[in-house]
Image: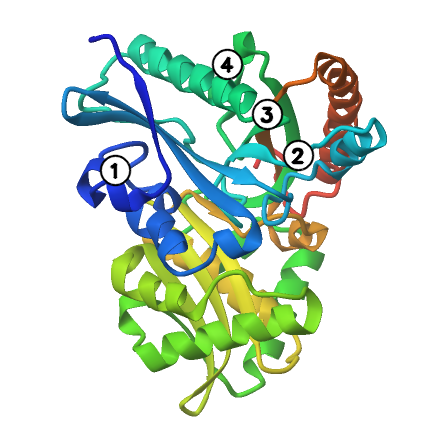
Amino acid sequence: MSDSRVRICNSLSEISGSSWDALGEPDYPFTRHAFLFGLEQHDCLEPFGWHAVYFLIYEGSELAAALPCYIKTNSYGELVFDHAWSQAYQRSGLDYYPKLVTAIPYTPATGERFLINRVLVREDDDAQHYRLLLSSAAIKFCQEHRLSSWHILFAHARILRLLESKTIMLRSDVQFHWQNHQYADFEDFLGRLSSRKRKNIRKERIAAHQHGLDIRMFEGHALDAREWSRVHQLYAAIYQRKYGTATLSADFFQHLGKSLGDRVLVVTARDADEIVAASLFFRSDSHLYGRIWGCEAYARDLHFECCYYQGIEYCITRQLEWFDPGAQGEHKLSRGFLPRKTWSGHWISQPEFRTAIVGFLQQEQRHIDDYQTQLMQHSPYRNENN
């Protein structure tokens, strides 16, 4: 291995798609060049406080490793909540923002964050060498630019633990994920549930289909530009009614359909030729990720059908191992999604705050562990070894 140096760029326009896509998990959709550069190209980042910074290591002319980061001027779209930390900084007369975040914008899906070219870097020790180089560069960048902290969100716990020597503090939370135990079909899955939960899911599916809608899942390339525009319109309308501004643009949706192929999926509910509800998914070779929902008007249990049950059927049919339908939501438990830990890592520049946050995280970890234990006591499955 040569004496590697870390370079920095501020846009994936400076890196070819083939070079970038040689890094990381090749089937994980959210670190692909098409996804990340699409966010850049189509105005999903800068207007909402995400300013890209990519840390790069080359071996000769080949990209060997990278760390995609963003300078953040808020905590919006991260889904690892640090508002209490921000308020503590403010009370002390210090600035918490800007900060550095290693994350996939608006996407709480666990995956590799330190992207390694596994053709060039074959040994685990060499990969760790690159992670430590990238970590040192990120910390140095924070210090030089007076950033309060560096946060690595929805990363693999094993990798984060390898970085504790860099004073990276680990934090966990719980999401609800569904696991495929080689079910033959949806009825086989239902057979593993308690009688009450099984009956409730059947009732919800019947109710969803009684609206007379044509509900089906399509690969992204099967939708034309008009249909993608409609899916975005439904998604944006949900935000306008409930949350404020939709951060993903109509052009980004069009881009997904053209560039991600069978890695992006859409469930549509149609009244004749009109799409009246839609849910957006992404997939890897082993995981399905549910991300976005939109509907024209409330229809009983349609959300559960489009966002959960269609996804479970897809996983069974395509033999995917896991279905991650997104952050939060205890209502997922009764529908077969069990609590699973997610992890983040945090470096804090101020030593006194670092000490305080260590205590906070220890207390929070006990709460998260108890919460997961309590949830498992309400597992919907008859066989608790699931």
Looking at the image, residue 275 sits to the left or right of residue 60; the answer is right
Numbered badge on residue 173: 2
Residue 71, x across and y down, in percent: 52, 37
Mark 1 and mark 3 in contact? Answer it, CB < 8 Å: no
First of labels 2, 4 by sequence position: 4
Label 1: which residue? 20
Of labels 2 and 4, the one closer to you? 4
Mark 4 and mark 3 in contact? Answer it, CB < 8 Å: no
Of labels 2 and 1, the one closer to you? 1
How packed mark 2 is, by other alpha carbons closer than 10 Å (few <14, some 14-19, many 20 or more), is many
Of labels 1 and 3, the one closer to you? 3
For label 2, the SS is strand
How packed mark 1 is, by other alpha carbons closer than 10 Å (few <14, some 14-19, many 20 or more), is many
For label 4, the SS is loop
Locate the C terminus and report the quarter of the image it occupies: top right
Label 4: which residue? 163
How far apart marks 2 and 1 lie (CA) works out to 30 Å
First of labels 4, 3 by sequence position: 3
Mark 2 and mark 3 in contact? Answer it, CB < 8 Å: no
Locate the N terminus and report the quarter of the image it occupies: top left
For label 1, the SS is helix
For label 3, the SS is loop
How far apart marks 1 and 3 lie (CA) works out to 29 Å
Q: Amino acid at mark 1?
A: Trp
Q: Amino acid at mark 3?
A: Arg
How far apart marks 1 and 4 lie (CA) works out to 23 Å
Label 3: which residue? 146
Q: Amino acid at mark 2?
A: Asp
Q: Amino acid at mark 4?
A: Leu
